[in-house]
Amino acid sequence: MQEQLRVNRQIIYDLAARYLEPLPGSFARLAYLAGLRDPKTGIYVHPDLHLIYPKESVHQALATCHEELFERSLELPLLEQREELLECLSAAGQVIPQELSNRRALFEAWIPPSTPDYLKELFQANLQALGELLHERNSKARSNT
């Protein structure tokens, strides 16, 4: 048990230091972790960490990290979420949509599978509010030009 805890801590440390820290904000990290999860099997796979650590340990550590980052992102104020979402989409080279509902499938993939329904609903409500904030921001930007 002690050895498994040590390995999981080391995996999370390596993941955070090498892969998550360089990313711009919570949403970019959330998107990265969601991308490591195979949608068919539900198993998290990391090409580099699997070379060093047991696959099951990597899966457990990544799943835990995904859940924790998801919950932390919900704790951010909406204006901070808006800026992080803009930064995430811009860094990925994606056009900022007028309606975030157009990207619902993308954002739903960011939700960890074991997330309780009330947190899923909060996330979706936040996305709707973020869509309104982005629309308001874009309207102000157009009227100032």
Image (cartoon, grey):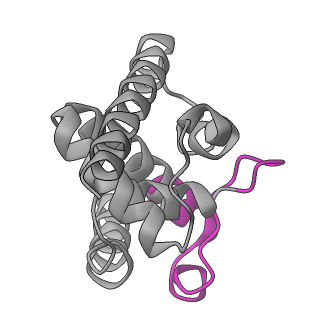
Near-viewer residue (56 or 36): 36
Quarter of the image for residue 17 reads bottom left
Q: Is residue 46 highlighted in magenta?
A: yes
Q: Observer-nearest residue: 10 or 88?
A: 88
Relative to 109, say whether 126 is above or below. above
Residue 53 locus on image (x, y percent):
51, 78
Q: Viewed as shown, does residue 62 lie left or right of 85?
A: right
Counting from the top left corner in percent of width and height, residue 18 is at 33, 85
Left/right placement of residue 111 relative to residue 74 reads right
- Give x and y (percent) for residue 143: 30, 46
Image: 37 above or below 107: below
**Quadrant containing the C terminus in the rendered view:** bottom left
Residue 16 in view (yes/no): yes
Magenta residues span 38-61
The front one of 145 and 66 is: 145
Q: Could you tell me residue 64's position as x and y percent?
A: 41, 47
